[in-house]
Structure formats: structure tokens, C-alpha cells
Amino acid sequence: MIVWLIFVCVAGVSAVEWDAPTPYDPVWLASVQQYPAVPPLNETRFWWGWVYEQDVQFRLFTRRNPYEFQVLKINDSMSLWDSNFDFNKKVKVLTHGWLNHGDSPMPESIKEAYLNVSDLNIIVVDWGNAANVNYILASYNVAMVGRLLTQFLNFLIDEGVSMDDMHLIGHSLGAHVVGIAGAYVREGPIDTITGLDPALPLFTLGNKDARLDKHDARHVEVIHTCGGYLGFASPLGHIDFYPNGGTRQPGCRFDYRGLCAHNRAHMFFSESIISDVPFTAVRCKDYDELYYSGSCKGTGETLIMGGFDIHYGKDGIYYLKTNAEKPFALGDLS
Ligand SMILES: *[C@@H]1O[C@H](CO)[C@@H](O)[C@H](O)[C@H]1NC(C)=O
Ligand SMILES: *[C@@H]1O[C@H](CO)[C@@H](O)[C@H](O)[C@H]1NC(C)=O
Ligand SMILES: *[C@@H]1O[C@H](CO)[C@@H](O)[C@H](O)[C@H]1NC(C)=O
């Protein structure tokens, strides 16, 4: 019931009339769904969150094709070897969230930022068909899309890509897609996962198999910008950043649905890739310090949030301030 209320208040969609099957467990759902399946009616997905293989597209961008993507297909070696995919370069996989597409600002801005700085293999996971349904169904689809991404990553491994070169980046529901993909990948762990304001509604802390958590990659970094509303407030990764306290964001004014704050996560991250000015954060004593005061005095240790090269550091909770508008980064603390 509480979950239902959160859904209604957060998403502002009150026209949904059916109940989600309970208990909510996308991993179980994925395991009982035979795949590929031939459901009699297209409407099946409205009830059970069916995701067809053709609903998820893996789009490759490199500096040779920064705007026109090449489609890579699971288990189709030719699609890989005939493409601009460069086995000597690192791989960034970008996954959007609810109501978004492969050409939404996230992943688009992050792709552009990376290609501006370096020639990389950027793979945009377009799961727009499965993400543009009501929130409950989209959240069911997350597990299925995650499993498809797992198959895709296993395929890359078979073709010779090392998991050490792999960095998965997901926003909102997309953060759980990459989390689930990372958890099930055959020759894990994946090197790094960045979760950009991982979606909260319907995802519980208890069921870590169905959401992003720190076991999904060697290094899991999370940026919280709408914690407690559209995003998780609790720490989920090895390193959790809380810009401006992680709940509300300056410059977002009457952000009653939280979408402005929710989107700040990928705006901060894409800026951090190209910016000369770092997002320097201070380490909190613990999560309680941040939770009760909304900020942290700092323990003396600092760490840069995001960046082209992820800054690995001491695991923990980090706090930083940003500007209210672009450019957001405030640089080194004086
Ligand atoms: C199912 O719906 C999709 C669009 O979501 C459409 O492209 C497809 O042709 C439909 N399939 C059938 C069997 O009606
Ligand atoms: C790809 O190959 C793997 C291993 O052979 C198989 O388990 C998986 O179902 C295949 N996936 C697709 C989409 O063909
Ligand atoms: C890439 O960087 C240059 C110089 O910093 C900038 O002028 C340009 O707009 C950037 N392009 C993209 C696509 O971000």
C-alpha cells in the first residue's frame, strides 16, 4: 500500500487501474519467463512485463561514427566484427531510465562527453519500448532487460572483450538494469558500475538481487540526487556521492515530482567527464552524519565525483556542493 502511494505521488500517474502482481520480484519473474516466448497477444506485456529481444537494441558509437549508430546483435559475431568496435579500447555501456529512449539526454550527453575526450566504444542500450509503459510495468521489465544485457556482455566476453575494460553506467531504472546485468555476467566481476540516482519506487533495500548493489561490480559508484523520492537515499555502492545532500537540488525550484533533481545525476556526471573543474567531495564520518544534518563536516579525506577516469578511493559516503546551474562543478575546496 505504501509502495502504491509512493508510486502515485511520485509519478503523478493515477489512471493506472490494475495492481502489480505480488510479491514484487523481477528476478523471479525473469526466471519463470521462457525466452524467447511467443505470447498470443501483444497485450501480454501490459500484464507481465514481457520484453522481446527486438525491444532492446545495442547501439555502438565511436569517433568514426559519433552520430550514426551501428547495431550490435547478441551472438552475432559478424555484427561485431563488421562494426567500428575496437577491441583495444575501453567499453562504456549506457542505460537510460523510465520514459526515456536511446536518444534521450541520458545517454546522449554522456556519449558526447566521452567521445569528445577520447575514442572509446560507447554502447547505448536502447530499451525504449520496454521503458515507455507505466512505471510498474517498466520496473518489471528491468529484470528482463538486465538479463538481455547479461547475454550481450557474455557475447562480448566470448569475442575477446575483457571485463576489466568494461564500465556500465545507468540512470534511474537503468541503474538497476546494469546492476542485474553485472550480477549475472558469466566472467564477472565487471570493472566499474556507475549508478546515477538509482530508481527507488518499487525497489526495496531488502531485495538486493533485483537492484543495484555493491556486489554487481568490482567498483560501484553511485550519485544520489533525488534520494527518498525518485531515487534511493540509502548507500548502495562502494562509494556513494550525495551532491547537495542528495535529496533536493539547487536550481530545481518547485520540483514536486522530483524529475529535475533526478536528472541532475546524469547532468553532473556528463559534465564531470569533460570538465577541467573537478566535483571535489568530502568524506562523511558515516551515513548518519549525512542523513541527520543533510551535509557533512568532512573527515579531511576528499574524492572527485565522476570524471573521465573514475577516481577510486576509500569506500564511503561523500558530500559535495554544486552550482545551481551549468557549469555545476565548484572545483577544489579551499
Ligand atoms: C506488437 O507491438 C509492436 C509495437 O509495440 C509492433 O511493432 C508489433 O508488430 C506487434 N506484434 C504483433 C504480433 O501484433
Ligand atoms: C546466446 O548464446 C548463449 C550461449 O550459447 C545462449 O545462452 C543465449 O540464449 C543466446 N542468446 C541469444 C539472444 O541468442
Ligand atoms: C567538444 O569539446 C569542444 C572543445 O572543448 C567543444 O567546443 C565542443 O562543443 C565539444 N563537442 C561536444 C559534442 O561536446
Image (cartoon, rainbow, N blue to C red):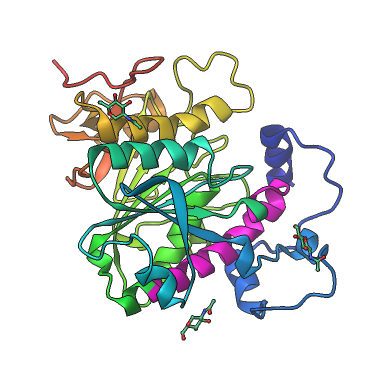
Residue drawn at (66%, 65%) of the image: 51
Question: Which stretch is magenta?
Answer: 130-155
The answer to if 260 sits in the magenta stretch is no
Percent coordinates x, y for residue 100 in the rendering = 59, 42
The quadrant in which the C terminus is found is top left
Residue 279 vertical position relative to residue 45 in the rendered view, above or below? above
Q: Is residue 196 left or right of residue 257?
A: left
Residue drawn at (84%, 75%) of the image: 40
Percent coordinates x, y for residue 27 in the rendering = 57, 69
Percent coordinates x, y for residue 276 in the rendering = 19, 26
Residue drawn at (53%, 62%) of the image: 210
The answer to if 145 sits in the magenta stretch is yes
Of 108 and 284, which appears nearest the observer?
Answer: 108
Residue 157 vertical position relative to residue 112 in the rendered view, above or below? below
Of 168 and 107, which appears nearest the observer?
Answer: 107
Residue 183 vertical position relative to residue 324 in the rendered view, above or below? below
Is any atom of residue 286 visible in this view? no
Residue 303 vertical position relative to residue 169 in the rendered view, above or below? above
Percent coordinates x, y for residue 322 in the rendering = 33, 20
Q: Is residue 299 left or right of residue 83?
A: left
Residue drawn at (66%, 61%) of the image: 24
Of 69 and 4, which appears nearest the observer?
Answer: 69
